[in-house]
Amino acid sequence: MSLSNLYKITSLDQTSEQITCTLQIDAAHPVFQGHFPGSPVLPGVVQLEMVKAVLSKALGKVFALKEMSTCKFLEVLNPTETSELTIQIQYKGMEPLDVNAAGKYGEKTYFKARASFHSII
């Protein structure tokens, strides 16, 4: 199943060491019919894919995950209750790109991750 149109970036701000991005999640996307019927959950792997997509958009490169040192999913993200997610990324270096990322909405933190990415293009 294609994940295209599952989310769109609605704002993106960055400095030389930080990116803050807001994404709008489409709660009607077909992925939620199977994950899970009647109780939709945004899969954790998709949340991490969002981090990679934000990095690529902000830095103008295509990235691949090199290493994940920590990753914690702290809340279940139900897109019918939370259709917007703010991803905050602190980064340094370039090859590899070392990242601390968190996905939040309001007072809730949905995930935290520390990882390294490398550019593939």
Image (tube, rainbow, N blue to C red):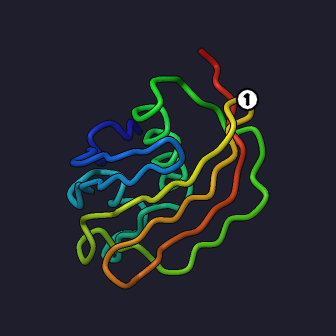
Q: Residue at x 45, y 38 (%)?
A: 53
Left or right of 81 on screen, residue 1: right
- Residue 118 lies, in percent from the top left, at 69, 30
In this view, the residue in front, 27 or 57, is: 57
Q: Amino acid at mark 1?
A: Glu
- Residue 92 lies, in percent from the top left, at 65, 44
Q: Residue at x 30, y 46 (%)?
A: 12
Q: Residue at x 50, y 48 (%)?
A: 51
Quadrant into which the N terminus falls:
top left
- Residue 90 lies, in percent from the top left, at 56, 54
Left or right of 37 on screen, residue 95: right
Q: Residue at x 40, y 32 (%)?
A: 57
- Residue 76 lies, in percent from the top left, at 46, 78
For mark 1, does the 10 Å Cα neighbourhood hold few (<14), some (14 to 19), or many (20 or more) residues?
A: few
Judge whether 49 appears above or below 108 on screen. above
In this view, the residue in front, 30 or 106, is: 106
Which image quadrant is residue 35 in?
bottom left
> Pointer 1: what residue?
95
Quadrant into which the C terminus falls:
top right
Provide the secondary structure element on which disc 1 rests.
loop
